[in-house]
Image (cartoon, rainbow, N blue to C red):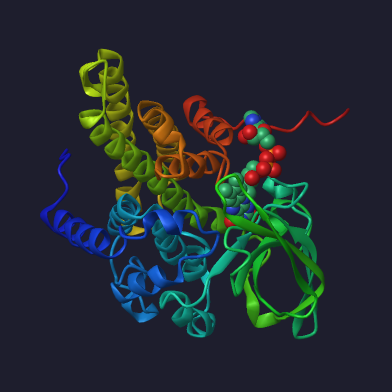
Amino acid sequence: MNFELSEEHQAFAESVRRFAQAKLAPGALERAHSAQHPWDAAQMLAEQGLLGITFSEADGGQGGSLMHAVMAIQEVALACPKSADIVQAGNFGPIRTFVEYATAEQKARFLPDLLSGKKLIALGMTEPDAGSAVTDLKTSARRDGDDYIINGSKIFSTNSPEAELFLIYVRFGPGVGGIGSVLVERGAPGFHIGEPSKFMSGEEWCQLYFEDCRIPAENLLLGEGGFKRQIAGFNIERLGNSSRSLALGRHCFNIAREHAKIRKQFGQELCEFQGIQWKFADMALNLESAQLLLYRAAMEGEHGLPSAHSTAMAKLACNQAGWHAANEALQVMGGMGYSQESIVEYCMRRIRGWMIAGGSIEMLKNRIAEGVFERSFSQRPPKAG
Ligand SMILES: Cc1cc2nc3c(=O)[nH]c(=O)nc-3n(C[C@H](O)[C@H](O)[C@H](O)COP(=O)(O)OP(=O)(O)OC[C@H]3O[C@@H](n4cnc5c(N)ncnc54)[C@H](O)[C@@H]3O)c2cc1C
């Protein structure tokens, strides 16, 4: 077993770091406080080859590995937390499931704009009555000649205010086997996008309404029986979430460490107090152990998709370590940490959302417990009779 990154991986991380620190670190605080997608940074990241890192060259990607994508998103997040959202959207989010299962014609239609940072794809999975219990989703798709007719509603979709394309989980028939997905373009007849609402992080989301929304049959992504394959693709999305949680926690740790070296109280630097030193020791332990679990899941996904178990372990560890580090860093920085003058409070608000999005920490623990006991535990009440 080797815990060192290969020379090639180290050189790749170093080159992304140099680019991100030079081009993205300036303006990081302003981007964090803007609700808008950072389109300026998207252009730069596309030109740098940091969108579609794991996609084949034939699909317009870089032919890299999941490990490269994880390193890239972390290096970008360490320079500009908000710009890491672009790396997420261009590598880990619904675009990854799309590339895995789309037809050649669908890829030719949509990928060039998505990979050049000009357009965004959003994921519509969650519904008002189907959150953690996602298989309770009701949004339906019915074949009508050369079209599908979609009815239902989705909430909380990341990038929904600005996305041009939506990957929507739909029901073609009853049960888990009846679930699949379709691609809906902004402006499709019967597709309405509601007014933006705000998360605690400042990110905006819009409710999506499908009222006899008509889409061409060639916009089908995965038909009936597609749910398990969709969720396998979603494991990659979870690793993007994990990587950002961890990197934002690390960013806060780095900022607070520099603060603790120069801020003086009672005539000495904060880092002289043992109460402060122990906070850093705990943060370092959590961050480094979560990083190993993240790399393990990424290595597992080198030649395919990472397993649900490794992904759940990595996401839980990264969410908790990132949150702990951001919260403790804020405490170490006192009033300055709590102020919008520092990016630490933004990182803390951001990481908090990822403990809910993409599989809440409770649902991840349910998944890990199933591995521990080697059986599944139904979360549903027993059937009567
Ligand atoms: C920042 C952010 C971004 C998001 N982006 C998207 C997106 O792009 N696309 C999309 O479709 N959705 C998105 N979501 C929605 C997200 O997937 C859901 O919020 C999540 O699945 C939880 O569903 P819920 O909010 O309805 O909570 P609920 O399912 O109502 O759960 C409420 C609480 O109960 C807990 N709970 C539920 N069931 C169990 C159980 N069996 N055992 C133990 N605890 C349980 C949960 O963990 C949670 O703490 C996003 C959410 C956030 C916060």
Task: For the N terminus, give its image quadrant.
Answer: top left
Quarter of the image with the C terminus is top right
The answer to whether any part of residue 317 appears in the image is no
State the residue in front, 362 or 207. 207
Q: Residue furthest front?
A: 267
User: In the image, residue 243 lies at what x, y percent?
Assistant: 38, 47
The location of residue 150, given as percent across then percent down, is 78, 70
Find residue 112 and report its horizontal and vertical position in percent: 44, 82
Q: Is residue 213 left or right of residue 17?
A: right
At 37% from the left and 56% from the top, the residue drawn is 28
* Residue 328 in view, yes or no: yes
**Residue at (52%, 80%) from the top-left corner?**
110
Position of residue 276 in the picture relative to residue 106 (left or right): left
In the displayed image of the protein, which residue is found farthest to the right?
385
**Rendered location of residue 290, percent (x, y):** 34, 35
Q: Residue at x 47, y 75 (%)?
A: 114
Splitting the image into 4 quarters, where does residue 362 fall?
top right
- Assign ligand 1 to one image quadrant: top right
Give whichever of 12, 267 is nearer the camera.
267
Left or right? Give the position of 210 relative to 237.
Answer: right
Say whether residue 213 is left or right of residue 3. Answer: right
